Image (cartoon, coloured by chain):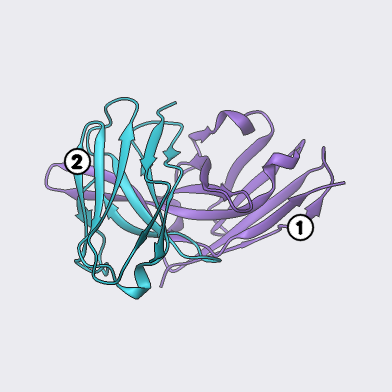
Chain colours: A cyan, B purple
Amino acid sequence: AIQMTQSPYSLSASIGDRVIITCRASQGIRNDLAWYQQKPGRAPNLLIYGASRLQSGVPSRFSGSGSGTDFTLTISSLQPEDFATYYCLQDYNYPRTFGRGTKVEIK
Amino acid sequence: DVQLVESGGTLVRPGGSLRLACAASGFTFKTYWMMWVRQAPGKGLEWVANIKGDGSTRYYVDSVEGRFTISRDNAENTLYLQMNSLRAEDAGVYYCARDQNYRYGSAYYDALDSWGRGTLVAVSS
């Protein structure tokens, strides 16, 4: 199975900060990666698909980049509603595998 | 609007069985791959199983292979997860999700664009 190594495990940031989360795949996965946001007690919400395509309705402060094995999710200016846990998910092959998550907390 | 509503979660003893259901509405259910994803208490997300729109193809994570069965009733717009020989490590919230296929130029991508609220499975004696 492809391992998705996500970092950092958690981070503290302030409103307006630029936040970068990374995912590294144990083998090349082309652009077959999506990013999800999950708030406590809620289902995950799709942010980015195809590594860099913004899902409809998602604010443009979210962006994704990368290809092959290294991917990043960037929040350009952190807003109060962005404090949540973020996950990457590879859809290159089965079994589908998630990163372990990054919890973004208020500094 | 797309709606996915899970049900069937409850407390079950180790070794027991349970069937989860996910009622879908607001889209043409039979044309979509569907997925179950679970989350143990305080832990991350784990993909469990996928099933093709016509039910002909299924995939499972190794830890549930042979114990869980994903199925669907396209006439009733319902996704199922039959869970047998349950273990403590199977406990958590189970989400169903729609696997959307996106076309971008000549490329196609998959992503889970709609999720249910989840149903809680507890495994304890």
In which quadrant of the rendered view does residue A67 lie?
top left
Q: Nearer the viewer, residue A3 or B78?
A: A3
Q: Nearer the viewer, residue B112 or B122?
A: B122
Q: Residue at x 26, y 44 (%)?
A: B109
Q: Which residue is mark 1?
A: B10
Q: To which chain does the residue with label 2 belong? A: A
| Position of residue B80 in the picture relative to residue A28 (left or right) | right
Mark linked to residue B1? none
| Position of residue A41 in the picture relative to residue A34 (left or right) | right
Q: To which chain does the residue with label 1 belong? A: B
Furthest residue in direction right, as rendered = B125
Q: Nearer the viewer, residue B22 or A76?
A: A76
Residue A104 x, y percent position in the rendering: 39, 59
Q: Callout 2: few (<14), some (14-19), or many (20+) C-alpha neighbours within 10 Å?
A: some
How far, Cα to Cα, is label 2 from label 1? 41 Å
Q: Residue A70, relative to residue A73: is it above or below?
A: above
Q: Residue at x 32, y 48 (%)?
A: A34
Residue B18 x, y percent position in the rendering: 75, 48
Residue B19 x, y percent position in the rendering: 71, 50
Q: Residue at x 47, y 54 (%)?
A: B97
In which quadrant of the rendered view does residue A22 lie?
top left
Q: Which residue is mark 2?
A: A66
Furthest residue in direction front, as rendered = A107
